[in-house]
Amino acid sequence: MVLRNLPPPLAAMTGSGFNRPMCCRYHLSTSPVLIAELFGVATIAPAIRSWLPRYNIAPGQACVMVRGLSGVAPPPPGLRQRGGLSGPLASLPCEVATARWGLIPRWAADETIGVRTINAGIETADSTPSLRESFRTRRCVVPADGFYEWTTTGGRKTPLWIGVVSEQTGTPGPFAMAGIWDRWEGPAGAVETFSVLTCAPNSLMAEIHDRMPVILAREDYAAWMDPSNTDVAGLTRLCRAIAPERMVAHPVGALVNSPRHDSPRCLEPASQMDPPTLFG
């Protein structure tokens, strides 16, 4: 059962683990075509057309992102009637593309830095050398249907699935995590990578972790993705914690503990039959 607030037994499991990365696993089963429709996107990169549902996406893997395009004419208005972009920037041209999770700055000597940049705190994104340029000029959204976090009690790690309730349907649905991206020229060619931005938690997430992913409001998508938007202060203000009543959480089984497992079973609620340890 999906819980809108963590019950006392779940809250009691959240005593440790705040030294680990935030949002290091998530799932996306919404199709690229529907993602394009949700975000009012006219362009889908060829690599994304074969995207299959993913239920346990891990750092270092190829993932979906949506980004604004520079120097591209806006698509005809008819293509945006059902899109997610609104306000004065509703004509922003965007594309759905793939990138690897773990940002590698274009000036990096090698790709190992990506291990440390799967997340980026909004408080320092504009001042950290590896993130600053991307924050100012290369922002994206990372679509997700839910993400996972782990709590620890009595030496046992318990995974939780966390989702966001749609304001349109009142049920959990796709949402947009704020991201930044870059293009690194490696020995084998160009590699595009991204990082998910995090912020201080709301009251629900504070029981689970001391950080949470920045989940953008629908009306802020265009302002966030617009490459010409250089208002650092304004961009930072967009990166606030979503209201706790918009989030749901429930324990899931130990299958999700290993990124080798990637199937709808990762979303199944925890049962008494789960083995005590399967982490790794």
Image (cartoon, rainbow, N blue to C red):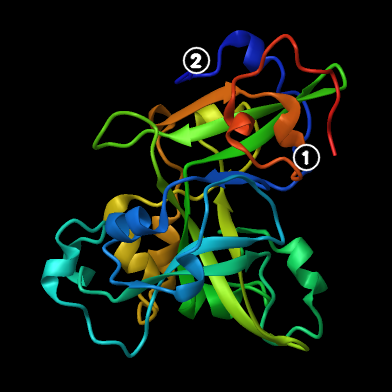
Badge 1 marks a residue whose secondary structure is loop
Lower position in the chain sequence, tag 1 or tag 2: 2
Q: Which residue lies furthest to the front in this view?
A: 50
Q: Give the residue displayed 70% in from the left and 56% down from the top.
A: 59
**Classed neighbour count for the residue bearing mark 2: other residues with Cα under 10 Å, few (<14), some (14–19), many (≥20):** few
- Position of 174 compared to 213: left or right? left
Task: Left or right? Give the position of 183 relative to 84.
Answer: right
- Real-space Cα distance between discs 1 and 2? 23 Å
Look at the picture and state if 10 lies above or below 158: above
Classify 52 as above or below 245: below
Q: Tell which residue pokes out farthest to the left in this image.
A: 78
Tag 2 residue: 1
Would you say residue 173 is visible in this rendering?
A: yes
Question: Residue 142, percent across and down?
Answer: 49, 58
Q: Identify which amino acid the numbered label 2 is placed on.
A: Met
Task: Please report the residue visible at 34 percent of the width from the left and 29 percent of the height from the top.
Answer: 171
Percent across and percent down for residue 214 are 49, 50
Q: What residue type is labelled 1?
A: Ser
Residue 258 - label: 1
Q: Where is residue 196 in the image (x, y as percent from the top left)?
A: 58, 58
Q: Give the image location of residue 255, x and y in percent.
A: 73, 30
